[in-house]
Image (cartoon, rainbow, N blue to C red):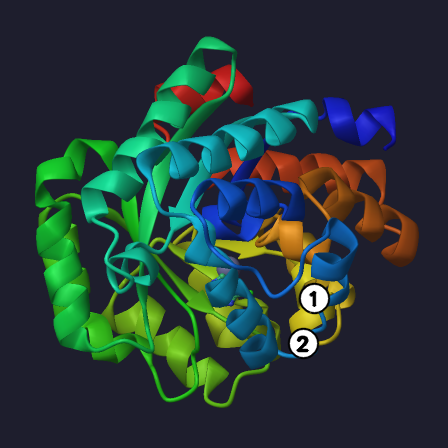
Amino acid sequence: MPEFIKYLPKAELHVHIEGTLEPELKIKLAKRNKIELQQQTIEEIKASYQFNDLASFLAVYYSGMSVLQKEDDFYELAQAYLQRAQLEGVRYAEIFFDPQAHTARGISFETVINGLTRAVKEAEQSGIKARLIMCFLRDFSKESARKTLLEAVPFKNQLLGIGLDSDEHNNPPLKFLTQYEKAVAQAYHTTIHCDIDQLDSIEHIKQALEVLEVERLDHGTNIVEDPDLIALVKKKKIGLTACPVSNGFVCPDMKAPEIKDLLHQGVKISINSDDPAYFNSYIAGNYQVLAEKASFTKADLVQLAKNSFETAWLDDGQKEKYL
Ligand code: ES4
Ligand code: ZN
């Protein structure tokens, strides 16, 4: 990894902790929890990562989570991510997790959040700060999101914000309007996945920005088609969290020209890893591929890293420490 990218201080704003589950840890936890995996070796697991769209990826991603059972499992998962991210120059991370993917399997909300929080607290001693964002699964019902927001109440001070992920098809932002309004009333920050090249992508982005009034868009690079949306995103200082390597798997195109175009138009777009254990690349690899394959300059990479801190949900005073 080029030293320049490694030592460039970065914030990571779009990483699913369940997507950082490396094959090594998957095997270790499967043994410990007596869960039978379909693949036995690291190589077999990696060979099973054959996806060419969002649906084929999500199937592998959700089934992989079955090994996560105990608080310690979630702790080890987050600890491993934070160590790796720190080695790649991440100073601050806002980490997604999918509570319903665990509560639906009979694992309690408390087990998940306490394991993750323990790792976050410990990491802070060694110089990487992190916070948690809980995502509703958009292919689950509104009622399930409502229950999840209620389950989170006792853990409110361990949570920074609310997100929306999983399968976007026929699951528009408006489906979750009530829960987003409730979340804002409870002082959560808000963001939404607006995946790339989805049917109704522009309509979903409009709902997210104009009705739910979220503070960031995850992906969201389809705004490049619509000058009015670009103007709105700039005016409201909405952050876009792009994930080029992930795009290459699920789109299946990195969308590097779109990312560069938005960057040069002054949109606050950042670079992130999404599901690094499945896409074989953590954050530095995402910066690197833009430099190598799409001629992003050092000045471009610096601006992307600055954008990551500017659109982080840190107080202005805290941001200055990093910028
Ligand atoms: C995801 Cl790539 C992607 N898209 C939507 N939801 C997700 N959850 C984890 N990775
Ligand atoms: Zn994502």
Q: Residue furthest top?
A: 125
Q: How many tags in the picture?
A: 2
What residue type is disc 1 on?
Answer: Tyr
Q: In 3D space, how far apart are the residues under numbered discs 2 and 1 (Cα atoms)?
A: 16 Å
Q: Viewer-proximal residue, 67 or 281?
A: 67
Q: Secondary structure at mark 2?
A: loop
How far across and down, in percent of the image, does residue 249 sit?
A: 71, 69
Give me the residue at 46% from left, 65% from top: 62
Q: Is residue 124 visible?
A: yes
* For residue 187, above or below residue 194: above
Horizontal side, residue 32 vs residue 316: left or right: right
Give me the residue at 78% from left, 37% from top: 299
Q: Is mark 2 within 8 Å of ligand 1?
A: no
Q: Viewer-proximal residue, 46 or 140?
A: 46
Give me the residue at 37% from left, 30% from top: 314
The earlier-in-sequence mark between 2 and 1 is 1
Horizontal side, residue 216 vs residue 275: left or right: left
How far across and down, in percent of the image, does residue 158 sit?
A: 23, 33
Q: Secondary structure at mark 1?
A: loop
What residue type is disc 2 on?
Answer: Cys
Q: Which residue is mark 1?
A: 49
The residue carrying pointer 2 sits among few (fewer than 14), some (14 to 19) or many (20 or more) residues within 10 Å by Cα, namely some
Q: Is residue 163 visible?
A: no
Q: Nearer the viewer, mark 2 or mark 1?
A: 1
The residue carrying pointer 1 sits among few (fewer than 14), some (14 to 19) or many (20 or more) residues within 10 Å by Cα, namely some
Q: Which mark is residue 251?
A: 2
Q: Quadrant of residue 114?
A: top left
Give me the residue at 50% from left, 90% from top: 199
Q: Quadrant of residue 48?
A: bottom right
How far across and down, in percent of the image, does residue 321 sit?
A: 49, 15
* For residue 178, above or below residue 20: below
Q: Viewer-proximal residue, 244 or 126?
A: 126
